[in-house]
Image: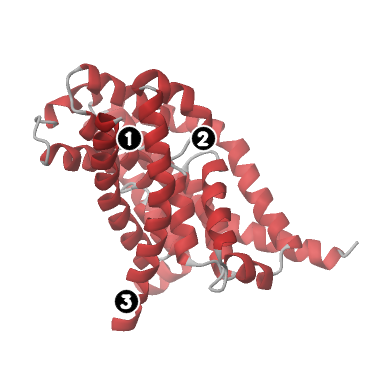
């Protein structure tokens, strides 16, 4: 019975209900902290709306114009250097919080995007071009340049390792 | 104009939104809660000055913390001023963006549990490696 209800509600909504329950629980212990958290949530959510619109706009147009066979060609198993470059630069250029890009990546994964490219995309997001002046201000230009180069190199290593480990895990199971 | 094609793309996008929306709101609520409750001014107390332990501690704190990367730069800059090693601060700011413990449930739901666990574990290890290499390279240059 409970299982049937859970299946009907679905994982995403159960997750949200659990988070709301955590809020309610903490509200009994410390109302001020929860009010602060809600205020932070509302401010961030409003700031997030344009990025959310961008992400779902991309999902809409990718479903409209990009055929799954093209995704598998450029970002699938047989994709070469071009695939890595798309993943790296896509990650660097993507704005907003990381979790906003999960729906698009999930959509592209269904169409054939390789796990290694998704991991590379998510890792190369650590390079934040608009925030570079701030990083230079706090840590200096040498540090910023060195770190940026390492992040780009390691985003490829990350993608490669994730793919290999997932394949190994898949083989074992 | 192919109306059927537009309708199909809109339906897929709407379904994707319907599935992602509760996850995105849930993650944002969790991040807001952590941002409001994590006592950031005491972060430096967790870092001891040990070159082996510090990057690990930095990466752990960065993995749990979440929010705008700009905050990580400001906090990292403050930690440096308080005498925390560059090694620990680098691990902290890289882990902030690349490893997401708070986002893990969302990543698992949308990209697969195995993928999320493997990716975050690999990212955590590589973050420490990056911190070590960046510190060494900066000293050499």
Residue underneath mark 1: B93
Is the residue A10 above or below the residue B26 in the image? Answer: below
How far separated are the C-alphas under marks 1 and 3? 30 Å
Q: Is residue B53 left or right of residue B120?
A: left
* Number of marks: 3
Q: Quadrant of residue A15?
A: bottom left
Front label number (3 vs 2): 3
Q: Is residue A104 left or right of residue B72?
A: right
State whether discs 2 and 1 lie on one chain: no
Residue A35 can be seen in this image? no
Residue A45 is labelled as 2
Q: Where residue B52 sits: x, y (%)? A: 11, 41
Is the residue A128 above or below the residue B24 in the image? Answer: above
Q: Residues within 10 Å of mark 1 (few under 14, many from 20)?
A: many
Q: Residue at x 32, y 62 (%)?
A: B118
Q: Residue at x 56, y 73 (%)?
A: A78
């Amino acid at each position: 019975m409970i299982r049937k209800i859970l299946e009907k509600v679905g994982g995403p909504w159960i997750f949200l209900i659990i988070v709301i329950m955590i809020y309610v629980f903490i509200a009994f212990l410390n109302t001020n902290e929860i009010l602060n958290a809600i205020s932070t949530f509302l401010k961030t959510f409003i700031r997030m709306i344009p990025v959310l619109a961008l992400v779902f706009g991309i999902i809409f147009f990718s479903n409209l114009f990009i055929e799954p066979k093209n995704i598998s060609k450029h970002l699938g198993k047989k994709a070469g250097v071009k695939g890595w470059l798309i993943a790296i630069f896509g990650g660097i250029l993507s704005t907003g919080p990381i979790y906003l890009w999960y729906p698009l990546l999930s959509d592209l994964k269904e169409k054939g995007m390789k796990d290694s490219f998704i991991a590379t995309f998510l890792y190369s997001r650590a390079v934040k071009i608009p925030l570079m002046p701030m990083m230079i201000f706090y840590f200096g230009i040498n540090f910023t340049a060195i770190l940026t180069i390492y992040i780009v190199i390691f985003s490829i290593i990350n993608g490669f390792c994730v793919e290999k480990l997932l394949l190994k895990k898949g083989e074992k199971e | 104009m192919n109306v059927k094609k537009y309708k199909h793309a809109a339906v897929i996008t709407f379904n994707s939104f319907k599935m992602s929306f509760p996850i995105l709101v849930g993650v944002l609520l969790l991040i807001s809660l952590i941002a409001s409750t994590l006592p950031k001014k005491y972060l430096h107390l967790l870092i001891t000055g040990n070159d082996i332990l510090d990057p690990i501690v930095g990466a752990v704190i960065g993995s749990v913390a979440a929010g705008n990367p700009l905050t990580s730069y400001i906090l990292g800059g403050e930690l440096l001023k308080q005498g925390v090693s560059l090694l620990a601060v680098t691990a902290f700011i890289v882990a902030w963006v690349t490893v997401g413990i708070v986002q893990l449930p969302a990543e698992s739901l949308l990209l697969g549990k195995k993928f999320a666990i493997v990716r975050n574990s690999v990212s955590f290890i590589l973050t420490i490696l990056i911190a070590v290499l960046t510190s060494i390279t900066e000293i050499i240059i």
